[in-house]
Image (cartoon, rainbow, N blue to C red):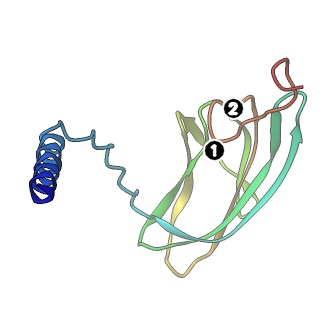
Amino acid sequence: MNIRVSLASIGLLLIGAVAQARQAPAAVPPLHRPRDRQYDVLNYRLTIEADLRGKTVAGETEITLVPIGPLFDVVRLDAAAGMTISRVRVDGTGRVYEHRGDTLEIPLGRPYAVTETLTVSATHSVTAPAKGLYFSGPDDADP
């Protein structure tokens, strides 16, 4: 009788496993491919001030980089859509730039070779950003 009970238990387990295998597969998350790299970053330097009450961050980001391909003539950086860019410099010289969506595009004025190093800096601010940086503090639910 113990053998029959054991066989019945194993049969139920197998039926359960088959039923579970027949369920719809889990949703597959979208594939995120890395961007093509245009340069190697040698150094990041961030100088920022945060106003916690105003939920604002302002400062300057300086990036020292080296092109990894020939004819490198534009730098593209991530810059959130709500961010204000007030000044951009390349090797200390002011540059024209375009901030569209989440991208800051800086034409360099000439192609840089893989043997050259350049420093790009941007002065920026953002208030209550929608993503990437979150402010939390005391409120009615959590004093």
**Image quadrant in which you'd find residue 26:** top left
Q: Nearer the viewer, residue 124 or 24?
A: 24
Tell which tag, 1 or 2, sits nearer the viewer.
2
Q: Is residue 44 above or below residue 26?
A: below
Q: Which mark is residue 96?
A: 1
- Tell me which amino acid carries mark 2: Pro
Q: Earlier in the sequence, mark 1 or mark 2?
A: 1
Q: Quick one: which residue is furthest to the top in this view?
A: 140
Residue shown at the point (42%, 72%) measured from the top left: 69
Which image quarter is the C terminus in?
A: top right
Checking the image for residue 129, the label placed there is 2
Judge by depth and name the residue closer to the eye, 49 or 136. Answer: 136
Residue in the foreground of this view, choosing between 70 and 121: 121
The residue sitting at 59% across, 32% down in the picture is: 81
Q: Is residue 89 left or right of residue 115?
A: right
Placement of the N terminus among the 4 image quadrants: bottom left
The residue at the point 33 percent across, 43 percent down is 29
